[in-house]
Structure formats: structure tokens, C-alpha cells
Image (cartoon, grey):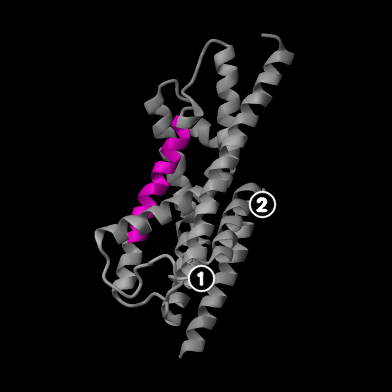
């Protein structure tokens, strides 16, 4: 294959992956918007002020899972596009690697597990009558503590380590043995990348309980912050600035409640 033909194939492959990611993100956000609109009109029965049944847990788990897909797909796109491009070149050279889909599946599996934990946390808060109809905490003190904890986490070494892995896809691959030829290997590599992403972002996701799990503007704001942290080449500057702001707002919440 000539260099020109290879470059055209790489561009086409990236275009296909980009289109797929856009479709996935749009569908996930459409579902979130539909749920939010239904709750505003009282059409969706969110289990806030009543005991949860198994169907309620499944409903909230599905909501969290789709929301995580919508929020995290844009931030993992650079990694997936790199993977797709290298995969195309490897196939052209006769050394194929496992498809991008296996890597993406591993990445999403981490956020599915997180969604299960988040659903359990929401069940606990609902049981303690600490959630409003918008699925935000009713306690200013609890909300303030969550903000302070999230702000402090933005300054931790663990946040820095995880963020560096997310900001530099090539460095991540180099430190984990490169691409995998077997599907299971690519799946595990995706899980590893997802674990770093979770380590980077879990505290920000906890803020959904402060602004409202179904507050679309709040969801979009957190998703934008996650994306900015990963694509702006300023190291930990963005997390540290936002961390100070979160902690300050958290203190204001607590002082205002006392």
C-alpha cells in the first residue's frame, strides 16, 4: 500500500470511529435529556421519597450507566482515535491488533461498575431522606462536605498520577506494553485506561449529588470540566484551580447552613 493510500485509509478509519463516538454520545445525551424532561413533568417515577423496588434499582442503574457513557465518551475520544489509527497501520503492515471496540468495551466496563456503586450510594441517600426530587442532596452541610472533599482530591498525588495517564495516551500505552493483538488483551488494556480515568474523575462525579443527578446543566458542566482537564496541556493547573473553588464553595455552604 502506498503512503498516500495508507494516509487516506487512516483518515477514513478515524472518521468512522469519530462518527461512531458522536452517535454514542448523542444517543446517551438524548436519553439523559429525555429522563430530565420526564422528571420535570412528573412523568418519570424517580424513587426519591419511597422504598426502592428491584425495578427502581435497575432504572437508576441504567440512568447512571447511560449518563456515564455520555459524559466520558468525548474525553476518551483522543485515545480511541489513536488506537484506531495505529490499528489500521498495523493491519496494513501485516501485524494486526485487536479492534478498537474491545478497548472501548473495557473502558466502559469500568464506568458500568462505577454506575453500580453510584446507584447504591443514591439508594442509601434516598433511604436516609437526603435527596430532593431533582436527586440532589437536601443537606447544605453534606453538600458542602462533598464539595470540600472533591476540591481537596483535586490536589492529591493520586489525582495527578491518574490525570497524566489520561492526558498522554502514547505515554499510557508505552507504560503498559503497547497495543494488544488478542481481544482479551485489548479489553484489559481498556480496563486499565478506564481505571486511571476513574481515579481522575470519581470525585467530580460525586458532585452530581450536590447539583442534582438529573440537572442537565450541572451534568454538562462536569462533563466539560472532565474534558478540559484531559485536553488542556497545563498539567494539574486546571484541577488545582477548580479544586480551590470547590473547597471555597463547600465552606460557604457549610457556613450558610450554620
* Along the line of sight, the residue nearer the viewer: 64 or 2: 64
Q: Residue at x 36, y 77 (%)?
A: 130
- Residues at discs 2 and 1 in contact (Cβ within 8 Å): no
Taking the magenta stretch, the answer to whether it contains residue 111 is yes
Which residue occupies 46% across, 46% down? 196
Q: Quadrant of the C terminus?
A: bottom left
Tag of residue 234: 2
Which corner quadrant of the image does residue 124 belong to?
Answer: bottom left
Q: Is residue 71 visible?
A: no
Q: Residues within 10 Å of mark 2 (few under 14, many from 20)?
A: few
Choose top left, top right, bottom left or bottom right for residue 93: top right
Magenta-drawn segment: 102-119
Query: Image point 55% across, 35% down: which residue?
Result: 80
Which quadrant of the structure image shows residue 86?
top right
Between marks 2 and 1 in the image, the one whose residue lies nearer the viewer? 1
How far across and how far down the image is residue 182, in percent?
A: 40, 22
Query: Which element is circle 2 on?
Result: loop
Total tally of numbered discs in the picture: 2
Mark on residue 211?
1
Q: Position of residue 187 (x, y in %)?
A: 40, 32
Question: How far apart, in angstroms, are the residues tagged by discs 2 and 1?
Answer: 27 Å
Amino acid at each position: 500500500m502506498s503512503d498516500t493510500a495508507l494516509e487516506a485509509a487512516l483518515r477514513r478509519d478515524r472518521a468512522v470511529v469519530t462518527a461512531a463516538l458522536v452517535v454514542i454520545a448523542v444517543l446517551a445525551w438524548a436519553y439523559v435529556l429525555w429522563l430530565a424532561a420526564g422528571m420535570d413533568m412528573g412523568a418519570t417515577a424517580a424513587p426519591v421519597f419511597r422504598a426502592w423496588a428491584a425495578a427502581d434499582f435497575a432504572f437508576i442503574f441504567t440512568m447512571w450507566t447511560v449518563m456515564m457513557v455520555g459524559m466520558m465518551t468525548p474525553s476518551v475520544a483522543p485515545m480511541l482515535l489513536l488506537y484506531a489509527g495505529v490499528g489500521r497501520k498495523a493491519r496494513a503492515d501485516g501485524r494486526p491488533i485487536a479492534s478498537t471496540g474491545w478497548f472501548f468495551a473495557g473502558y466502559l466496563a469500568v464506568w458500568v461498575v462505577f454506575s453500580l456503586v453510584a446507584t447504591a450510594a443514591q439508594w442509601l441517600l434516598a433511604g436516609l431522606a437526603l435527596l430532593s426530587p431533582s436527586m440532589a442532596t437536601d443537606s447544605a452541610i453534606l453538600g458542602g462536605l462533598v464539595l470540600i472533599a472533591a476540591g481537596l482530591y483535586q490536589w492529591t498525588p493520586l489525582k495527578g498520577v491518574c490525570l497524566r495517564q489520561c492526558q498522554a495516551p502514547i505515554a499510557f500505552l508505552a507504560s503498559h506494553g503497547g497495543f494488544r493483538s488478542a481481544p482479551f488483551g485489548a479489553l484489559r488494556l481498556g480496563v486499565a485506561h478506564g481505571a486511571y480515568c476513574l481515579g481522575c474523575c470519581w470525585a467530580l462525579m460525586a458532585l452530581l449529588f450536590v447539583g442534582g443527578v438529573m440537572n442537565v446543566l450541572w451534568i454538562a458542566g462536569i462533563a466539560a470540566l472532565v474534558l478540559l482537564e484531559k485536553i488542556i496541556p497545563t498539567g494539574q493547573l486546571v484541577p488545582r484551580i477548580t479544586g480551590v473553588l470547590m473547597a471555597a464553595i463547600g465552606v460557604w455552604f457549610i457556613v450558610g447552613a450554620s
